[in-house]
Image (spheres, rainbow, N blue to C red):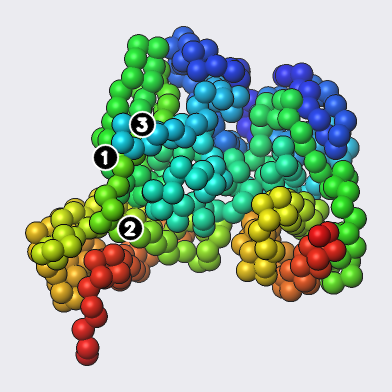
Amino acid sequence: MNAAPTAVYSPRSLATALAVLADRAPVTVLAGGTDLMVELRTGRTQVASVLDLWGVEELRFVRAEAGGVRIGALTTITELRRQPSLGAWPLLAACAADFAAEQIRNRATVGGSLGTASPAADLGPVLWALDAVVRLRSRDGVRDLPIPAFLLGYRRTARRADELIESVWLPGRLPTERGAFVKVGTRDAQSIAKVVVALVASRDAGSGQVTAVRAAAGSVAERTVELASLQELVGRRPDAAALLAVSRVAASRDCAPIDDVRSSAVYRRHALQRVVCDMLTSTLEVPLEDG
Amino acid sequence: MIDLRFRVNGEWRSVRVPPLARLLDVLREHLALTGTKEGCGEGECGACTVLVDGAPVNSCLVPACQVADRDVVTIEGAGHESIQEAFADCGGVQCGICTPGMILATRACLAEWTARGEPCTEAGLRRALAGNLCRCTGYGGIIAAALRAHGGAT
């Protein structure tokens, strides 16, 4: 490890953690360590002082709130998998099931994933598609930011230096809605996505018209991005050809992939288009056409 | 530096270490528990797996300050000789570098499934051990060993 930090604070209460942030900023925030410990070892990140949140039990909760659910920032991926009260949000479980591997799931946290803001994060697209709202808390109060206003760029968020990610709130889901989560990687476990997509869609049972679509993707731009082109499906009764067309538009307009060690820009666009088309077909239950 | 007190293999230990020292280094360098191996050092391979409060973690990613007052089990304290014997009998061990982590990850998932009354299947084991890489065996012997250990344990 490179230069050791001058101070590591390990508070046991949220109030103390917020005081450290207010008085000692800038402080690097440490949750489960699955990202920061690697960054420190490789020397990609240097830290002056560290706020270790692992002992702040107040940030470890899942509770019903305002017709939805509020998930504390220190909730681990393992807890997301096991928490029965999250059954109404099956996309979370789908994402958690193949999230890295058991050893990582036991340490990686919801708040850590959000705060790191990796463009390849699995959780980013899921929380975006589920209309999640991030709650930031400082000594001065709270700010609630929808995911699009929170994830600003490559490993960059709207969190101020004196704020902590306290929790994330997810609205309740409609019974007519269906969701899908697809990750393309070199293997199911432990791989960082080449492309990752979360999508929720619903249609009116009577008219068959699409009533809502929300989809977001990771590893195809410098941050998690919404596949906004899919909005043109709303109010329509799309057939298979329409889904093919709209997925092509999304893969062309809604992303800006790069060539890197994991994949190429060309492959990412191609995979995104195919994955989105499949996800729309299954969630909207559109029959495949012959030929 | 911090004065870290935690339980290792059932015994309370105290060491003076940098707060962000890796649990892996604390175990190996300060407590001479060299059964825990370092593979990749970045949370990919699972060779350094230990149990913290019963849950498998990569000790290369856990800072010392986060195990204060916690319960850590390494291969030296793993007990459960039926698992070790099954690994030896089924060809689940070759070079041995992944073995301590494999055995602890196996022990954790078998304990969890037994506690929940869930069946132990080959597919389940392959998922549960997906964070432990082995470059020798091709995994067949490891999965066979884990299945046999489960049969023996229940």
Chain letter for mark 2? A
Q: Is there CB contact under 8 Å for labels 2 and 1?
A: no
The picture places residue A112, in percent across and down from the top left corner, at 48, 36
Distance from disc 2 to disc 1, alpha carbons, whole Å, reads 19 Å
Q: Earlier in the sequence, mark 2 or mark 1?
A: 1
* Residue type beneath disc 3: Glu
The picture places residue A134, in percent across and down from the top left corner, at 34, 32
The picture places residue A59, in percent across and down from the top left corner, at 50, 27
**Which label belongs to residue A248?**
none
- Whether residue B100 can be seen here: yes
* Residue A57 in which image quadrant: top right
Residue sitting at 24 percent across and 80 percent down?
A: A288
Q: Is residue A199 left or right of residue B70?
A: left
Secondary structure type for disc 3 = strand
Q: Decide which of B120, A124 is in the foreground and name it.
A: B120
* Residue type beneath disc 2: Gly
Depth check, mark 3 against mark 2: the one in front is 3
Mark 1 neighbour class, 10 Å CA radius: few under 14, some 14 to 19, many 20 or more: some
Height in image: A137 above or below A291?
Answer: above
Q: Write down the residue under mark 1.
A: A148
